[in-house]
Each structure stands twice: as structure tokens, then as C-alpha cells.
Image: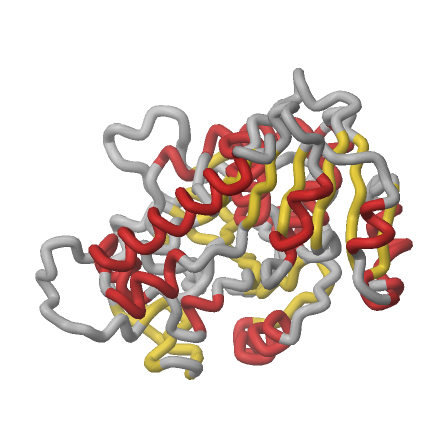
Amino acid sequence: MRFRHLLQSSVGEIRPSLSAKDTWRKMMRHQWWSVTQLFHSKGGYGAATLSMKRDPLNIKQSDSEFPLILGRDVSGVIMECGLDVKYFRERDEVWAAIPPWKQGSLAEFVVLSANEVSHKPKSLSHTEAAAIPYVANTAWSALVNTGGLNKDNCSKKRILILGGSGGVGTFAIQMLKAWGAHVTVTCSQNAERFVRELGADDVVDYTAGPVEEPLSALEKFDLILDNVGGDTERWALNLLKPWSGAKYVTLVTPFLQNTDRLGIADGMMQTAATVATKALKHLVKGVHYRWGFFAPSGPALDEVREMVDAGQIRAVVEETFSFSQVPEAFDKVEKGHARGKTVVQISKGGDDL
């Protein structure tokens, strides 16, 4: 059987391709996929770490990560299950986010582990569902696993999201508001109405000048989620409530760049030293400094599904592309200033399953 997939054959080069491989082992045939800003995929970042995860024994004995199949989000139908898979059946409609150390989702068939998969929300089309898994797992990992928030302790907590109009930000706004938090967001002026419609309580326009001053005039925060990076941590931690367990969680870390530059062992040591130094520096000031990472989780998506079907979270799809337009989709995402997710149709037929 021949099926389509998308290959990256070198840094920066993305092209559609065909493959003639057996597909009897393929668990899922999916129709929609969304573009994420995994710059280590298209730009070459993270090759050392991801290579170790994919080939820990160095069986390939190659320094090249190419060709790669890109993509993380999937929404589609299960075609076949392994003998030990009990929770899913053939023809189930599911969604998932694939770990970055596995080959990606830009193919008509993908193989997934059962613990990465969740049943798709009944209220969403596959187009909409493909916009959620990666950002949901990322926000969940940062806010719940790292930040310690949940539906039972979030009420009336003050949360600041730096960079709130992209995929992770728009999802986080909705989840936090569903849990009763007060949410402040930074974004551009032309995105203010958009994030307010999603539930943001206070909005600060970063295009009007440095945001430190208007944010400092507000009541201090219980948690900050940083999607921006750069020099934000220089001033952002001063916005937290001291000696109250308040946390700063950034999704912009040097981990992959360190392992690329220094190798796995030295890169991990450098990374550990960096985060430990920063955590200690801020701990003496009464606030907690943390790094957040994407973590695939079917159980987390199960909880997200319930919120989606309850009308508490909606998919934010900015634009859709056909499979042949994937390079254009990547170019659009890399330009930034997103208003939600960019989605690609893999299989013909749309949502007619």
C-alpha cells in the first residue's frame, strides 16, 4: 500500500512524499493535523536529544536526523489495535499528540502508544480537534504538572500569561477560566478583543511599549506562564506574590540548544546547572522558578475532552491548508503573531469518516 507523508530531508527543506510500506501495524489513519512551532524540527534544533530518544543504542550509526516526518497533532480513526490495547477499538475516533522523539503525524497512517491517545470530543470536527492536543498537553504539563494547578485549587488565583494569543496561550486562557482563575494576558493590540472573547480578564498590549510598568501596577500573581522568553524572566518574577508558593513557569528553555551545542552528557549537565542556579536565586526571594515542557498524555486529553464537550473550551483554528500546501503552512507559523492554530488536511474527504 502506498501512502503519503511529509519528509524533511535537510534543515529547512520540507517536501511531500510517497511511501510503499506495510500498514498492517498502523494504529491510526488520520485526516487532520496542525502545525506547531517546534523549531527544532524544521530548524534543526534538538537533533542530539531527539536522536538519542529515537535510537538510544545508535543502531543507525548516523549523525543525520534526516529524513524526518514532521507533525505532532493528530485527529482521525483507529484502523487496528495491538493485542494489549483494551481501551480502544477499531473505528474509534481519537485525537493525540505524538512525542517529538517519534516520527511525526504528517502521514496518512501513524503508530501511537495507547497512553498517548484519547477519544475525540464528540462536539468537535476532526478539523477542530487537530488544533488542540499538542497545545493542550503543553499547557497541562506546564500548569498542572509543573505549576501545581488543578480544577480544585485554581479558583480566584491570579495567573499571568505572557504571550497569550498563540496556540498554548489561547488554550491556557480557556482552561484556567473554566477552573475559576483570574487571567491576565499580554498580546498585541489587535489581538485584545480575541483573547477577551476567550475569557481573559485583563489584557496588556506589548506593542504600546515595555509591559513591566502596566503589569507592575496590577495586583501580584500566583503563577506566571511565559510563552515569550528572552529577557522576560529578568523582571517577570518580581510580579509574583513572595513567600506564598507562587511560581514562574517558562516554556522557553535552552535544553535542546545545550545538547546540540555540547552533546548529550555535557548539555544535560549545563542545563541542570542553569535551572538549579536560577531556581536557588529566586527561591531566596520567596518565589519558585520552573521550566515547563510538552508531555504527551492521553489521560490529560481525556479531561480536556470533558471540558470541550461541556462547552468550556473551544478549538481556535486560524487557517487551514491542504497537504500540498504544507510548506506554506510552516512559513505562516514561523512568522509568528498567531491567533490560534494552523491546520492541515491530510486525507481527502474532510470529516466524512
Q: Is residue 146 left or right of residue 55?
A: right
Q: Residue at x 26, y 51 (%)?
A: 24
| Vertical placement of residue 327 versus 116, above or below | below
Residue that lies at the very extreme toward the right in this rendered image: 193
Residue that lies at the very extreme toward the front in this rendered image: 284
| Vertical placement of residue 199 versus 45, above or below | above
Q: Residue at x 78, y 54 (%)?
A: 212
Spot occupied by residue 243 in the image (x, y as percentages of width and height): 63, 25
Would residue 119 be seen by someone viewing this image from the given angle?
no
Quadrant showing the N terminus:
bottom left
Foreground pick, 22 / 284: 284
Foreground pick, 322 / 230: 230
Total numbered circles: 0
| Vertical placement of residue 164 versus 345, above or below | above
Spot occupied by residue 307 in the image (x, y as percentages of width and height): 68, 29
Spot occupied by residue 38 in the image (x, y as percentages of width and height): 48, 63
Foreground pick, 285 / 65: 285
Q: Residue at x 34, y 25 (%)?
A: 86
Q: Residue at x 78, y 48 (%)?
A: 185
Would residue 281 be seen by someone viewing this image from the given angle?
yes
Foreground pick, 342 / 44: 44
Q: Is residue 231 left or right of residue 42?
A: right
